[in-house]
Amino acid sequence: MFKNPDKAPKQYTPGEALQKIAAFCAYQERTQKEVEQKLRSYGLDEDEAGEIIIRLGREKLLDEERFAQAFVRGHYRQKKWGRRRIMQELKQKGISEYCIKSGMKEIDGEEYYQNLVEVLEKKDRQEKEKNPRVRRMKISQYLTGKGYEQDLIKIALDDLGKTPEDDE
């Protein structure tokens, strides 16, 4: 899988590139940014790449709103990420605010809180820290890194019985 830096990438005609990129998009949801980068790596100029992207959109092979919805579903159900992290990742991928909002509607409040509790309990079992205050802080930092909101983290920690007063 090592790429030879001396070897130039294969150049494709717009017709060949369209076939390759259609298969690329059919395999899994893609962003416009990803598709454009791939087309540029095929040796197409900006106009040719733009025309192909428009065609892919018309043929429903490229849909950023659908990408955002799939991304949100996958990352909050499988990876158990929080809203903040998911939104940050979508912004980094160049997804529009409208598509991000549409994607975020995929999150079910009950299931979201249940994910938070599951992640918290798992981290609580793994955490070796004995001091309750430091332990709570470490778990809270971990959950913040996963993208969960501070107010929900506090509620979940309190529900679990990890109150900051435990060490007094």
Image: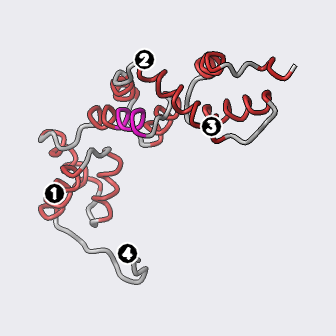
Q: Position of residue 143 (x, y in %)?
A: 60, 32
Between the residue at mark 2 and the residue at mark 1, the CA separation in whole angstroms equals: 40 Å
Q: Does the residue at mark 2 contact the one at mark 4 (Cβ under 8 Å)? A: no
Q: Secondary structure at mark 4?
A: loop
Report the side of 109 relative to 161 (left or right). left
The image's mark for residue 44 is none
Q: Quadrant of the C terminus?
A: top right
Mark 1 or mark 3, earlier in chain: 1
- The percent position of residue 77, horizontal first and vertical second, equals 39, 33
Q: Nearer the viewer's eye, disc 2 or disc 4?
A: 2
Dividing the picture into quarters, in which one does residue 136 lie?
top right
- Secondary structure found at label 2: helix
Please name whichever residue, 156 or 148, is drawn nearer the observer in this view of the structure: 156
Q: Which residue is mark 2?
A: 109
Q: Earlier in the sequence, mark 2 or mark 4?
A: 4
> Which image quarter is the N terminus in?
bottom left
Identify residue for label 3.
125
Residue 110: give x, y in percent of width and height.
42, 17
Residue type at tag 3: Arg
As shown in the figure, which amino acid type bears the numbered disc 4? Answer: Met
